[in-house]
Amino acid sequence: MAINLDFPTVWARWPSFLDGATLTLELALMATVFGGTLGTLCAVGRRSRNSTIASLSGAYVEAIRNTPFLVQIFLVYFGLASLGLKLSAFTVAAMALTINVGAYTTEIMRAGFDAIPRGQIEAAEGLALSRFQVYWHIVLLPAMEKVYPSLTSQFVLMMLASSVCSQISAEELTAVANFIQSDTYRAFETYITIAVIYVVLSLVLRAGFWGLGLVLFPRLRRLGTPL
Amino acid sequence: MSDPTAIVSLKDVHKSFGPLKVLDGVSFSVARGEVMAIIGRSGSGKSTALRCIDRFERIDSGTIEVCGHRVDDPQVDLKALRQDIGIVFQSYNLFPHLTVEENITLAPCSVKRVAKAEAKSLARQVLAQVGLEDKLNSYPEQLSGGQQQRAAIARSLAMQPKVMLFDEVTSALDPELTGEVLKVIEALAADGMTMVMVTHEMGFAKGIADRIVFMHRGKVHEAGTAGILSAPATPELAQFVGTGF
């Protein structure tokens, strides 16, 4: 049994692959920024003394963690459409990814917040810092530093999961591949190609997070020891 | 309050944690420039009394007044209160992600809105006071326990508090490091800083404190000058001093 592989036919479509990869990376970056912010705010919310805010944040996390991502995408896509909102597939995909990764970020950041010793907060309060200043100066970055490897993994996973957005015809990498394989009948070669591209994108993303870490955590950069 | 010279004054303070009565009618006052040592067994309520002064614990009844702030008032201006009080803890609690300089300049810059350059010169000044000028750019983990505690004292001093609270600040240190921290506190006392310290260092308390409060089962059991340590009036203090701790 011989496998007959014909990559040149597939690779001739490289501009499409490049467009798809770019869109995937754009989706991932948007979801990282917005989902990261959303998740951090909800992590603060889950620890709030206000029980309404705390349970709303909790409900959001559980709703997202216990439903499939594809279903979430359809809910956003068809939900907004039935409300009369006509948004591009890209916008819907970015929103769905943000909502999804925001929930996981909430749980990761909450673990980071919980890992900040009570004494740190008391020392800051004793210096007359306000609640917001305590969170901003004393809690946020050390919490993030403690869970940074988990955050990195989660955002890379989210980038890979963006593949599901092909289902609402957002023109990301997998959607591009679906089109190319139906056009060329070279399915195996097409998906091997994007598998390799996804690996490269993951490595790029990890390198990006590593570099961002050096900027965010000067102590780690100088001493190299875990917090 | 009755004593106008008092910087800190507690009157009939009660505090329970659930069914556990921790403070059972505690009263004492500290005058400007006075050094008070609170001693007593573990669980006698001395740390809780100190934490109530900085409102880390809310009291059930009684009054606490610090530099004109009614600490027991639910509406007390915490920001103003805590600018007048400096507190140093047993576990140092330096911010590990910030350099020593950043630890010190954070509160002056963000609470008092002091300009960055001014805060930095303030940092150098308070670090000189505790003998750590060369550690400006070190991170807490690069310092010994004694150095960390001195940096924590410097951090409090940078806010120019009117009274300093020390909560067993040498309990985590070996005798040599304890000595270097106590020297800093002695220098502060000589400068006229008002201080309330919870301590297990009997010799130090005797040497530095203008007044000693011995707490026992949530009450001020005996109070007076350092002389009470040599000539206790109650058997509880005699036993406490006799055992050393």
Image (tube, coloured by chain):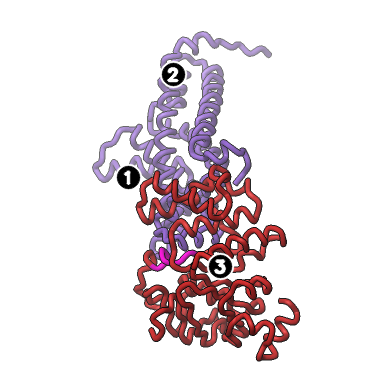
Chain colours: A purple, B red
Q: Secondary structure at mark 3?
A: strand
- Residue pointed to by mark 1: A79
Q: Where is residue B171 drawn, in percent x and y? A: 66, 65
Q: Secondary structure at mark 1?
A: helix
- Residue pointed to by mark 3: B166
Q: Do callouts 2 and 1 mark residues in contact (Cβ within 8 Å)?
A: no
Q: Name the chain letter of the residue that bears numbered label 2.
A: A
Q: What span is colored magenta in the figure?
A: B81-86
- Identity of the residue drawn at 50% across and 30% down: A208
Q: Do callouts 3 and 1 mark residues in contact (Cβ within 8 Å)?
A: no
- Identity of the residue drawn at 57% across and 45% down: B135
Q: Determine whether B208 is above or below B176 in the image.
A: below
Name the one closer to the observer, B227 or B233: B227
Extreme residue in the right direction = B243
Counting residues from the start of the chain, the first of labels 2 and 1 encountered is 2
Give the distance between the C-alpha atoms of the residues marked 2 and 1, in whole angstroms: 31 Å
Q: Name the chain letter of the residue that bears numbered label 3.
A: B
Q: Magenta-highlighted stretch: main secondary structure? A: helix
- Residue pointed to by mark 2: A18
Q: Where is residue B183 drawn, in percent x and y? A: 62, 61
Give the distance between the C-alpha atoms of the residues marked 3 and 1, in whole angstroms: 59 Å
Q: Determine whether A20 is above or below A32 in the image.
A: above
Extreme residue in the front direction = B190
Q: Given the image, on which type of amino acid does mark 3 rest?
A: Phe
Give the distance between the C-alpha atoms of the residues marked 2 and 3, in whole angstroms: 63 Å
